[in-house]
Image: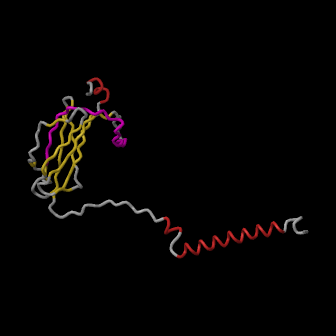
């Protein structure tokens, strides 16, 4: 749990929501969302400075934070998804919740509002509801090359083996004949 003195020193509270879809959901499909609440120790950027990306090493997770969810369609109208408005993060600042996607196809935005020490913080994420058949990308590893086929492919392997054996025999004969031609050996 975060102490008030720590919070006043740091002052950068955040809430983050992630909707676990591939960017779309079928109408009335169950969707999972994950929320974290934390204090970011990273100093906010000064005027004209580019904000730094999130860095989890700088986070202090804040537990038992009250959350409120809202979904709006692409026209800005609120859509009822029957999510309890009394949800809270656990002691570690984490909440995973499920909700049912709207029945009507279109683009939607889910927003989570977190009440931390009397101030409200929010984050949003978009998702699409569509009944069209979607192709789910399949990630397959790239096969490693067959080393045997690169080094020794069919008849080329036999030719290479015979050539190497012939070279070894020639070198061996040359060494042996060279020993007979050494000074002192040739005179006998």
Compared with 169, 90 (above or below) is above
Give the residue at x 34% y 61%.
Answer: 140
Quadrant housing the C terminus = bottom right
- Report the residue at 16% width, 52% height from top: 108
Compare residues 188 and 104 and report the one nearer the observer.
188
Would residue 53 be found to the left or right of residue 126 on screen? right
- The residue positioned 22% from the left and 41% from the top of the image is 35
Specify the quadrant of the image occupied by residue 179.
Answer: bottom right
State which region is magenta.
49-71
157 relative position to 44: left or right: right
Q: Is residue 50 magenta?
A: yes
The percent position of residue 52, horizontal first and vertical second, equals 36, 42
Image quadrant occupied by the N terminus: top left
Please say whether residue 23 is one of the residues in the magenta stretch. Answer: no
- Counting from the top left corner in percent of width and height, residue 2 is at 27, 27
How many numbered marks have been drawn onto this rendered protein structure?
0
Colour pattern: secondary structure
Which percent across, then down, holds residue 45?
35, 38
| Residue that sits furthest to the right in the current view | 187
Snapshot quadrant of residue 184: bottom right
Q: Could you say where residue 29 lies in the image, as x and y percent from the top left?
A: 14, 54
Q: Is residue 120 left or right of residue 165?
A: left
Outermost top residue: 5
Indicate left or right for 26 with 187 as reference: left
């Amino acid at each position: 749990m975060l102490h008030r003195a720590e919070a006043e020193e740091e002052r950068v509270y955040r809430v983050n929501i992630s909707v676990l879809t591939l960017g779309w959901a079928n109408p009335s499909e169950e969707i999972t969302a994950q929320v974290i609440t934390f204090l970011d120790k990273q100093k906010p950027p000064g005027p004209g400075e580019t904000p730094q990306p999130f860095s989890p090493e700088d986070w202090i997770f804040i537990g038992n934070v009250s959350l409120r969810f809202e979904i709006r369609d692409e026209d800005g109208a609120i859509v009822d998804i029957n999510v309890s408005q009394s949800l809270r993060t656990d002691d570690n600042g984490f909440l995973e919740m499920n909700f049912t996607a709207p029945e009507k196809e279109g683009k939607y935005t889910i927003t989570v509002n977190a009440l931390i020490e009397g101030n409200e913080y929010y984050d949003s994420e978009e998702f699409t509801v569509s009944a069209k058949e979607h192709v789910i990308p399949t990630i397959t590893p790239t096969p490693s090359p067959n080393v045997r086929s690169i080094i020794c492919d069919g008849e080329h392997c036999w030719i290479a083996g015979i050539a190497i054996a012939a070279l070894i025999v020639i070198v061996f004969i040359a060494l042996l004949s060279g020993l007979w031609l050494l000074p002192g050996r040739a005179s006998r």
